[in-house]
Image (tube, rainbow, N blue to C red):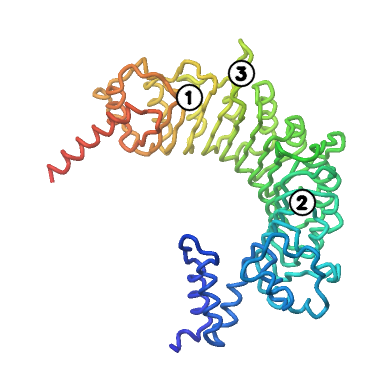
Amino acid sequence: MHQALLVPEVILKIFAHVKQIKDPLYTSTPLYRQCLAALATTCKAFYEPAMDFLWADMDSLLPPLGCVTRLHPMIYPSAKKFWSKDIEPLSELERSQFLRHSGRVRSLYVSSDDDIHLLYFLPFDICVFPNLLSLSWMVVFSRHLHFFLSPTLRNCYIAIIQPELVQNSIGTRCPVLEDLDMVTMGPRARAPHLSESVRSCKALKRLQCPPLDSAAWKHLSTIPTLLDLSIHQESFSLGPPPELDTHNLSFVTFLNVTTLRFCYAPIADIIAVMQHSEFPSLKEFEFIAHVLPGAELLPVLRALSQCKACHTLEKIVISDDDLEVEEPPGDSFSVVRELLCFTQLRSLRLVINCSINLDNDLLLEVVSSWPQLRTLSLYDKRHLSPKVTFRGLFAALRRCPQLHALNIELDLVNIDIDPKAESFQHTSLITLGIHDSPAADDEAIARIIFAMLPNVRFANTWSKISEHHESLQASSNLQVGGGD
């Protein structure tokens, strides 16, 4: 054997590469696992590192259970559904067989508790996988979760929150937990169960969970490592959404949080939390709702502007997903103007039903307020007649030299610019999108864009305009080629 293969760093690099091997179609066992198993039996020098890679990622409990002599013939070559029903739990002797390679497992995905009853005789405080770093718990109940809460766990995904989660004290068992994702409330779960679980965690960097109570919000403000906070109320939640006890909210500062998201959370709770909070390091804010009329959106934006984030916020995404709701006739809300105080904004995406009322003057005011802007998407779902003309577009682009993606309603009927009379070119813009706006002269519009926006790519909505644009590009390429 070559001497280089005796160097641990070299072996680890090689085995890491083996783990990236793509599987051919219709393979029952991943090819990389077959290769690692073969390498483990090649020589003593390969055994330990190959086995570490082989066992690192588990998507069920079958592999460790297959190490138990009594269970092996039931699992291999292929375990039947509900194979473990009526099978006796592991004995004390079999426990060591099951745990033989458990220390090598770093990532575990548990989608069923059909086989967990085999672990009943294990001591309550034992951790089955002591070096586990990542756990995805897709099981409905969490009464057996304690077997998998490793003191080394960094990332944890829990599909359904149940009252038993509190008994497991996830933060106490996993003191270095950094990333916690809890999706939805179970039918018996209530706000205190979620709150106690969150408050047991002291080292979080990222948290996504259903709406929290005031005690949990206060606790999170004391975690200096917290960077990313997402409150997500699933529409298919099995239990009622926790209610925020607004009368108990304290004024707190989230010193290092850079990303804040609210998805389908009660709007009144969002406003209350932000009115009682400061986010001096906030860079990204996302707000998604089922229905988002302007009368409810404006208080959210005003609360956001009071969170000490006016000079730090760089990205805002706000959208609703109900296409049927329309703004009441006659109502008009200057939604965009509420955001002008965020002077460092680099990316804005608004996809909402309420009035944006974008015209040449407002577009110019927007880009003048945000000189660092890279991406701008303002989509009014009501599809009113566009008010931004080409002259207004290019006046705005002159103020925004770094913009590379723009998605707005654009007037393609009233062409108010002659590209032959203009020397301006915006070379940074790469993506330009419009929304089903009728065009008066497809070829003339294509010539304007070809002359003044030389690097733009077209969205599908441009159809005939993009065909003319491609023809102009092809002709230009031929002339350049002929000149060479």
Precedes in sequence: disc 3 or disc 2: 2
Q: Position of residue 322 (x, y in %)?
A: 62, 26
Q: Amino acid at mark 3?
A: Glu
Residue at mark 1: 363
Residue found at x 79% / y 60%: 145
Q: CA distance from mark 3 to mark 1?
A: 23 Å
Task: State the residue position of label 2.
Answer: 140
Badges 2 and 1: C-beta atoms under 8 Å apart?
no
The quarter of the rendered structure image containing the N terminus is bottom left
Identify whether 408 is placed above or below 78. Answer: above
Q: In terms of secondary structure, where does tag 1 sit? A: helix
Q: Is 335 located above or below residue 116 in the figure?
A: above
Q: Amino acid at mark 2?
A: Val
In terms of secondary structure, where does tag 3 sit?
A: loop
- The residue lying at 66 percent from left, 42 percent from top is 260
Q: Secondary structure at mark 2?
A: loop
The image shows residue 308, relative to residue 296, as above or below, that is: below
- Mark 2 surroundings within 10 Å by alpha-carbon count, few (fewer than 14), some (14 through 19), many (20 or more): some
Q: Could you tell me if the residues under marks 3 and 1 are in contact, i.e. CB atoms within 8 Å?
A: no
The residue that mark 3 highlights is 326
Whichever of callouts 3 and 1 sits on the residue coming sooner in the sequence is 3
Question: Along the line of sight, which residue is nearer the eye, 187 or 367?
Answer: 187
The amino acid marked with disc number 1 is Leu
For the point 61% across and 18% down, the residue is 326
State the image coordinates of residue 123 (x, y, percent, origin top left). 86, 71
- Extreme residue in the top direction: 330
C-alpha separation, residue under disc 3 versus residue under disc 2: 38 Å
Q: Position of residue 360 (x, y in %)?
A: 45, 20
- In the image, residue 325 sits, relative to residue 397, either above or below, namely above
Is label 2 or label 1 in front? 2
